[in-house]
């Protein structure tokens, strides 16, 4: 109990120095947490992928489409439960600053294949019956002030023209990590318009979302799909939804590695700063430690005092940084929702932050602890200040 009181009193003997050190550690731990959360979000689409969904695309590239006639042939393959066409639309709402993902989908297949998007029965019915109907995420609706029945016009980029839609549903995610910033509309509306304006681009699907009955046989089903269209004019490449998402993540892998490195550099910098602070503190108290030794305190008592003080300050800063991470993440999610649909701090990130704070405190105290514990009484008593 005495040592604990001694450590606490020493930690705040120089209040300004202690406050600055705690603040520095807190800011570093907060930055570390936000960077680690960003890395985790990059892989969120991969982690939330369903094991019961496959994605079939053109074997050459996503740039090339697939004939709509493939859909029925895919549905007839053993193990397939559902199949629906999907096209990336790439429309712009008012200006490019209002970018959000928008897709043309087959309503019934989409609702069956994506149970994580929650709609009321009335909204589902309205979406199915209206060719111009659209379904939007709750966050996207909140951002633009949309409500059921509103008319929304998107300017086409891939598919030129002004496209008018009616909001028939506002979905919520089954989980907090579900993306609620997407815009979906009826694929038939797109296809019928293309038949009138650009016939050569009609009856084409960007990708097919395929449901499988048994996730363990997903690889076999994927091979069967690709074999069905082998040597055709548009061969397919079918993979699990997780593998499909990973192909996009792989394009930016270097960026993620750089962010990870920066997150560790932040910790190393604050570790050096904390070590310098503790070294300065130990140097100022050399004569005090020598006096304690003359009173009968052993080297391990001195070591515990220095080590405990460093660890206490680092953990205090770490806790402050962890608590600051949550409002910071909430602010980012609110203000930058178009870039970060969800910015959720996970338990794993919190554990990493606390571990980093402990590592900073322990590492920063190594040299000061050794110096204080090994100081000779005669040498220490000659030091003044």
Image (cartoon, rainbow, N blue to C red):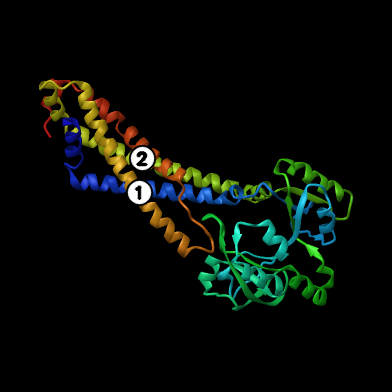
Up/down of 81 relative to 131, above or below: above
Quarter of the image containing the N terminus? top left
Residue 373: x and y in percent read 22, 24
Q: Nearer the viewer, residue 71 or 385?
A: 71
* Residue 147: image tag: none
Provide residue 343's location: percent of width, then percent of height.
48, 55
Q: Dot 2: within a 10 Å radius of its alpha carbon, few (fewer than 14), some, or many (20 or more) residues?
A: many
Q: Is mark 1 on a helix, strand or loop?
A: helix
Q: Which residue is drawn at 24% across and 48% down?
A: 19
Q: Mark 1 points at which residue?
A: 321
Q: Where is residue 297 in the image (x, y as percent from the top left)?
A: 15, 22
Q: Residue at 56% across / 57% down in the picture?
A: 174
In the foreground, 66 or 126:
126
Q: 204 or 12: nearer the eye?
A: 204
Disc on the earlier residue, 2 or 1:
1
Q: In this view, does 295 lie to the left or right of 75?
A: left
Q: Name the residue under label 2.
A: 357
Query: In the figure, residue 115 lies in which quadrant?
Result: bottom right
Circle 2/circle 1 CB separation < 8 Å:
yes
Residue 248 appears in the picture as rendered: yes
Question: Could you tell me how far apart the alpha carbons at marks 2 and 1 are, in whole angstroms?
Answer: 9 Å
Give the quadrant of the C terminus: top left
- Give percent across and percent down for residue 192: 79, 74
Relative to residue 198, is residue 269 drawn left or right? left
Res 126 → quadrant:
bottom right
């Amino acid at each position: 109990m005495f040592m604990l009181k001694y450590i606490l009193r020493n930690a705040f003997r120089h209040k300004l120095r202690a406050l600055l050190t705690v603040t520095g550690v807190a800011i570093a731990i907060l930055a570390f947490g936000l960077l680690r959360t960003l890395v985790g979000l990059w892989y969120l689409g991969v982690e939330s992928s369903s094991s019961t969904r496959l994605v079939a695309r053109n074997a050459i590239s996503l740039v090339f489409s697939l004939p709509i006639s493939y859909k029925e042939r895919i549905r007839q393959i053993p193990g397939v439960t559902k199949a629906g066409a999907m096209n990336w639309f790439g429309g712009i709402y008012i200006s490019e600053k209002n970018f959000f993902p928008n897709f043309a989908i087959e309503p019934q297949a989409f609702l069956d294949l994506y149970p994580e998007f929650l709609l009321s029965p009335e909204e589902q019915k309205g979406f199915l019956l209206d060719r111009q109907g659209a379904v939007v995420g709750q966050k996207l609706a909140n951002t633009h002030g949309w409500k059921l029945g509103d008319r929304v016009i998107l300017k086409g980029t891939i598919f030129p023209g002004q496209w008018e839609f009616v909001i028939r549903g506002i979905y919520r995610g089954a989980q907090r990590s579900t993306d609620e910033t997407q815009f979906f509309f009826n694929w038939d509306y797109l296809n019928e318009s293309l038949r009138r304006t650009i016939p050569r681009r009609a009856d084409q699907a960007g990708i097919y979302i395929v449901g499988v009955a048994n996730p363990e046989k997903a690889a076999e089903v994927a091979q069967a799909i690709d074999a069905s269209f082998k040597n055709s004019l548009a061969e397919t490449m079918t993979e699990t939804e997780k593998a499909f998402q990973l192909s996009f993540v792989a394009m930016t892998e270097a960026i993620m590695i750089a962010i990870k490195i920066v997150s560790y550099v932040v910790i190393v910098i604050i570790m050096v700063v904390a070590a310098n602070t503790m070294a300065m503190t130990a140097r100022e108290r050399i004569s005090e430690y020598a006096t304690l030794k003359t009173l009968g305190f052993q080297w391990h008592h001195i070591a515990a005092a220095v080590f405990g003080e460093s660890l206490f300050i680092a953990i205090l800063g770490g806790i402050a940084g962890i608590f600051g991470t949550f409002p910071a993440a909430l602010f980012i999610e609110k203000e930058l929702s178009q870039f970060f649909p969800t910015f959720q701090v996970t338990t794993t990130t919190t554990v990493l932050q606390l571990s980093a704070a402990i590592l900073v405190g322990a590492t920063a105290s190594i040299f000061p602890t050794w110096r204080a514990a090994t100081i000779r009484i005669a040498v220490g008593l000659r030091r003044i200040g």
